[in-house]
Image (cartoon, helix red, strand yellow):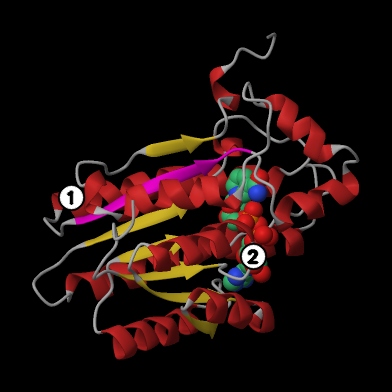
Amino acid sequence: MSGQLEGKVAIVTGGASGIGAATVERFVEEGARVLSTDVQDALGQEVADDAGALFMAQDVSDARAWDGVMAKALGEFGRLDILVNNAGIVIGKNIEEMDLDSWHHLLGINLTGVMLGCQKAIGAMKENPGGSSGSIINIASTSAFAALPGDVAYTASKSAVRMLSRSVAVYCAQSGLNIRCNNLVPGATHTGIIDTAAKSVPGMVEMAAAMSPLNRIGQGSDLAAAAVYLASDNSSFATGSDLLVDGGMLAVHPGY
Ligand SMILES: NC(=O)c1ccc[n+]([C@@H]2O[C@H](COP(=O)([O-])OP(=O)(O)OC[C@H]3O[C@@H](n4cnc5c(N)ncnc54)[C@H](O)[C@@H]3O)[C@@H](O)[C@H]2O)c1
């Protein structure tokens, strides 16, 4: 099916790579006009050019950079319907190894960046021509449900994002804003983040595949397809929800 996002305007953060790049491509295929952002500007520009999207360099942890991104989206497209808060990093430090700089760095991107995105997007979506409306998709992780002992900051950030989304969802609903906010929850997905983690955990990709009853690792396209659903009007009754796309990883008892 195509055209599910016809007429809609989307911002996707972390659009240079992995799930973000796949989402930029799929959203354009579905008819959306897309502004992709990332700290990797050369790769981000290349991916956006190939997909037919716009690109802007952005560090999601920087509040002023968000103002620039909103101004660009509204200046180019005149409205904002969808925000995918996708940019994220891993650090790979357990509680004993964790230093304060790494902790703040990760939380600045994975948590504060998501909060800022929600706040700025609501400001823009409230002013949409035709009335307040929009869909915010925050990329959480299965580590918001089951902890990663080797990445305490990542686990903390993703579980915080999971509840942040609910707070935003209920606030928007109770304020009559017609703005939805949902978590998209990837399981192990073959992207840059997994390749980085695999450097410190040999056999990571195979292990990740074995954790899924489907016995495979996810692809960016699996998550992009789910993001289309949450971004489209097909999900108009879904808000404050967790959409798990994890190959059944969290469905299985650890003993089986
Ligand atoms: N791959 C997985 O197995 C997996 C599982 C669960 C959740 N996730 C989440 O999915 C999201 C996308 O990750 P991915 O797997 O595609 O990894 P990725 O590394 O391929 O992509 C992440 C992108 O975010 C960008 N980025 C990093 N810091 C940024 C910043 N400060 N500002 C703007 N952009 C920044 C990177 O440059 C990169 O392009 C992340 O939030 C990640 O936590 C991934």
Neighbours of disc 1 within 10 Å: few (<14), some (14-19), many (20+): some
Camera-nearest residue between 38 and 233: 233
Drawn side of residue 223 relative to residue 3, left or right: right
Instruction: Classify 217 as above or below 44.
Output: above
Instruction: Classify 81 as above or below 250.
Output: below
Instruction: Determine which of the numbered discs, if any, sits on residue 17 in the image.
Output: 2
Residue at x 89% of width, y 47% of height: 200
Residue for badge 1:
173
Camera-nearest residue between 156 and 226: 226
Give the x, y percent position of residue 177. 15, 60
- Residue 4 visible to the viewer: yes
Q: Which segment did they paint magenta? A: 179-187
Dot 1: what SS? helix
Looking at the rendered structure, the kind of residue marked 1 is Ala
Image quarter for residue 235?
Answer: top left
Q: Is residue 54 magenta?
A: no
Mark 2 close to ligand 1, CB under 8 Å = yes
Drawn side of residue 190 relative to residue 220, left or right: right
Work out which residue is located at the far top of the displayed protein and give it: 255
Ligand 1 is located in which of the four quadrants?
A: bottom right
Residue at x 41% of width, y 65% of height: 29
Query: Dominant secondary structure of the magenta stretch?
Result: strand
- Residue 92 visible to the viewer: no
Dot 2: what SS? loop
Residue at x 42% of width, y 46% of height: 226
Mark 1 close to ligand 1, CB under 8 Å = no
Give the x, y percent position of residue 14. 57, 67
Instruction: Determine which of the numbered discs, if any, sits on residue 110 in the image.
Output: none
Work out which residue is located at the far left of the displayed protein and give it: 130
Mark closest to the chain's N terminus, 2 or 1: 2
